[in-house]
Image (cartoon, helix red, strand yellow):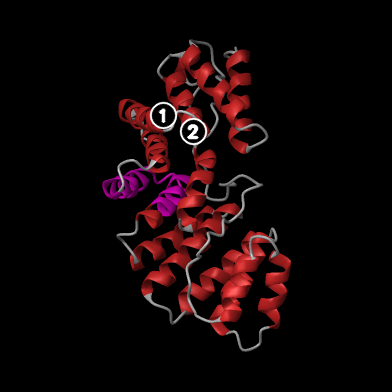
Amino acid sequence: MSPCAVLAAAALIAVALPLRAQTTPGPPLATAAQSPAPSPDAEDAPADAQLPIPPVPPRIAEGDQYDRCMDMLADDPAGADALATSWKAGGEAAAHCHALAQVELGNPAAGAALLTALATTSQAPPSSRAEVFGQAAQAWTMAGTAANAYAAAAQAIALAPEDPDLRVTHAIAAIAMNRNQEADEDLTDALETDPKRTDALVLRATARRNLGRLPEAAADVATACAQDPDNADALLERGIIRQRQGDLEGARADWEKARELSPDTATGDLAQQNLALLDAGPRQ
């Protein structure tokens, strides 16, 4: 699995935003489930997210030293960073490992900047450069810089427009920028390649909800929940849509299950926030 696909699932909790309490008299359904439009500078990923390093990360070079450095990222990022920075003749290989190590060490903005620079100047094939731009987009998202994430994801798509993982990465950035129609188009393309992709279905439900297309959003999230009944992100999103449609008990059941399935995570926290707002009712 590519890092784009893995992070997409984690980032769903960033775009399935919690409901907002009503501030004017009237039925709770009027505005209680509306999600505030995210600003370009808002934080777009959970603080505890990590850039996933798959078993075979995208390669921009060859060699035993490079393989060793990349293999160290998951379990010993500090060691990988030390190896990369001391590797004077490492070139792009060392730069790539150093950038990913920075992200793993909790410095996503620094890692994102390094990844963006590397993808821009690399002599690797377009597909590899696209993957590195995708990693940069993920890291910018973790750093809370949606505009940079969107730009990096757009560059990734320009290099590899048929890659469904990169389409999902671009969609995440687009939703964070309130470009929901673009996200819808990206995710539709990704789902044409893999109709059973749950993360893309949930993201598209979020985009369509933000566009006010609730029946289509409900259909997408229903399919996602049918495919994976214990997907906490899908349950979180379905609860928001159900609340918008007036099914308060259905929303409560979804959020309670999401909280149970994902305790001590951003998804569980959002579900808890929504339950608290539901219990509080409209503010007069």
Please tell me the numbered disc located at residue 225.
1
Name the spot of residue 94 as percent of width and height, x first: 60, 79
State the CA–CA distance, disc 2 to disc 1.
7 Å
Observer able to see residue 252: yes
Please tell me the numbered disc located at residue 151.
none
Mark sitting earlier along the chain (2/1): 1
Q: As rendered, which of 61 and 124 lies closer to the eye?
A: 61
Say above or below: 61 vs 73: below
Name the spot of residue 260 as percent of width and height, x first: 61, 26
Residue placed under numbered mark 2 in the picture: 231
Q: Amino acid at mark 2?
A: Asn
Observer able to see residue 283: no
Q: As rendered, which of 280 and 11 lies closer to the eye?
A: 11
Judge left or right: residue 34 versus residue 46: left
Contact check, label 2 and label 1, Cβ < 8 Å: yes
Residue at horizontal 40 percent and vertical 49 percent from the top: 171
Category of crowding for the residue at label 2, using alpha-carbon neighbours closer than 10 angstroms: few (below 14), some (14–19), many (at least 20): many
Look at the image and tell me in which quarter the C terminus lies: top right
Q: Which residues are magenta?
A: 168-193
Residue at horizontal 62 percent and vertical 74 percent from the top: 68
Furthest residue to the bottom? 89
Q: As rendered, which of 99 and 178 lies closer to the eye?
A: 99
Secondary-structure class at tag 1: helix
Residue at horizontal 69 percent and vertical 72 percent from the top: 81
Q: Amino acid at mark 1?
A: Cys
Q: As rendered, which of 2 and 237 lies closer to the eye?
A: 2
Look at the image and tell me in which quarter the N terminus lies: bottom left
Name the spot of residue 213 as percent of width and height, x first: 33, 30
Name the spot of residue 97 as percent of width and height, x first: 60, 72
- 82 drawn magenta: no
